[in-house]
Amino acid sequence: MKKEDLIEFLSSTIEEDAIISRLYNLIHIEYKYELKFLDDLVQYGVEKHYFSIESVAHSDETYDKVEWKSDNNYQEVIMTDHEEIVECLFSSNPQIPEDFTKFLNNE
């Protein structure tokens, strides 16, 4: 994934703007990343306890998997542990947190 696209994705999870329909349309349709790649990225974040997959309507309701559909407006990916990541992303020179560098390509 390009650095700026990964920054966009991670920033969205912090800003609670990572509703699946938005991610699907932006990252998959517009930026052309495979759904498997997106799913691997989200699952990695969940396993490392960075992300939670939550209900938009009820934040106490969580999911194990994302339903990748263009009209999925009931699930969102939320950054749960973001203090160090905010420091990396929201600076004058945004950087990818070390745990997520494995998702970068060298374009």
Image (spheres, grey):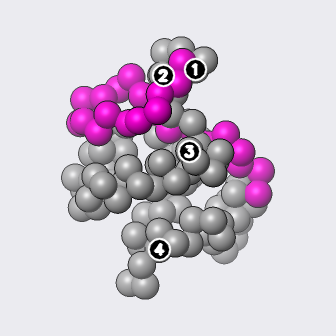
Which element type, helix, strand or loop, lies under badge 3? helix
Type of amino acid at the residue the image marks with label 3: Val
The residue indicated by pointer 1 is: 59
Marks 4 and 3 close (CB-CB < 8 Å): no
Q: Which of the numbered marks, if any, corresponds to residue 104? A: 4
Q: Disc 4 or 1, which lies upstream in sequence? A: 1
Query: Is residue 79 one of those drawn in magenta?
Result: yes
Q: Nearer the viewer, mark 1 or mark 3?
A: 3
Which residue is found at the position 52% from the left and 46% from the top?
Answer: 12
User: Can I make out residue 95 in this image?
Assistant: yes
Type of amino acid at the residue the image marks with label 4: Leu
Q: Disc 1 or 3, which lies upstream in sequence? A: 3
Q: Residue furthest bottom?
A: 106
Residue 40 placement: quadrant: bottom left
Pinpoint residue 66: horizontal percent, then vertical percent: 38, 36
Type of amino acid at the residue the image marks with label 1: Ser
Task: Estimate how packed mark 4 is, as few (under 14), some (14 to 19) or many (20 or more) residues with alpha carbons within 10 Å.
Answer: some
The residue indicated by pointer 3 is: 46
The residue indicated by pointer 2 is: 55
How many numbered marks appear? Answer: 4
Which residue is found at the position 22% from the left and 52% from the top?
Answer: 29
Q: The N terminus appears in which quarter of the rendering?
A: bottom left
Which element type, helix, strand or loop, lies under badge 4? loop
Residues at marks 4 and 2, CA–CA distance in whole angstroms: 28 Å
Task: Estimate how packed mark 2 is, as few (under 14), some (14 to 19) or many (20 or more) residues with alpha carbons within 10 Å.
Answer: some
Marks 1 and 3 close (CB-CB < 8 Å): no
Residues at marks 4 and 3, CA–CA distance in whole angstroms: 18 Å
Q: Which residues are magenta?
A: 61-84
